[in-house]
Amino acid sequence: MPKKFFQRLMPEHHVIKEHKHLQFLGEHLHNPNLWHLNRRSAALAVAVGFFCMYLPIPGQMIVAAFLAFLIGANLPLSVVLVWITNPLTMPPMFYAAYKMGAWIMGAPRQVEQNIDPEIFTLGKALHNLGDIWWPLLLGSLIFGTILSAVGYVGVRLLWRWMMIQRWRKRQQRS
């Protein structure tokens, strides 16, 4: 069961409470939803993680941790889900986000020719960053928002379905 697996990996509450570098957060760090896995905190964590993984900025994990802390989502799960964006997944994800943003904004055609996916390189993308930044940001926000909403609803529905299945099995046994 995934819940028990994640609970074994999570730190003990008293260790976090006594950590000297986290004292500035005060009592806010002791919100049980930040560390416990329940339907609400897990769904919010998936929403935060999916939204932050599409942000085209460095420090996505810090943003995810801050948002999870702010809304009471499961903190470790929020941060771990950001790792979906890695050097292998970033180019197709951000290219798709750029294409979506460029389509909505009606970006000039010469910019799209400079960002050809067959000869896409990081150097070329950084050189054209001024031209592609706004379409990339818009597409990333759109994809992040849609994925976070789908992830939130999906986790809530999956959790409910699993609870109904567990309840039915218990009813059949008795």
Image: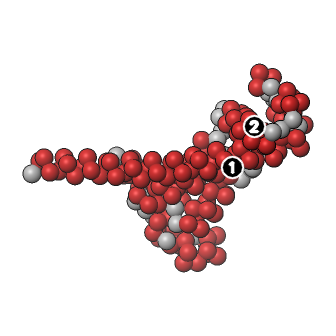
Colour approach in the figure:
secondary structure
Crowding at label 2, few (<14), some or many (≥20) Cα neighbours within 10 Å?
Answer: few
Identified at 87% across, 35% down, the residue is 108
For the image, the number of numbered tags is 2
Mark carried by residue 45? none
Secondary-structure class at tag 1? helix
Q: Which amino acid type is marked by label 1?
A: Leu
Identified at 67% across, 58% down, the residue is 63
Crowding at label 1, few (<14), some or many (≥20) Cα neighbours within 10 Å?
Answer: some
Q: Which amino acid type is marked by label 2?
A: Trp
Q: Position of residue 84 (x, y in %)?
A: 60, 41
Q: Is residue 115 above or below residue 161?
A: above
Residue 123 in sight in this render:
no
Mark carried by residue 141? 1
Secondary-structure class at tag 2? helix
Distance from the alpha carbon under mark 1 to that under mark 2: 14 Å
Q: Is residue 16 above or below residue 85?
A: below
Marks 1, 2: nearer the viewer: 2
Residue 129 found in image quarter: top right
Pointer 1 with pointer 2, Cβ within 8 A:
no
Q: Which residue is mark 2?
A: 103
Q: Position of residue 61 (x, y in %)?
A: 65, 53
Q: Is residue 141 above or below residue 35?
A: above
Identified at 68% across, 49% down, the residue is 141
Q: Earlier in the sequence, mark 1 or mark 2?
A: 2
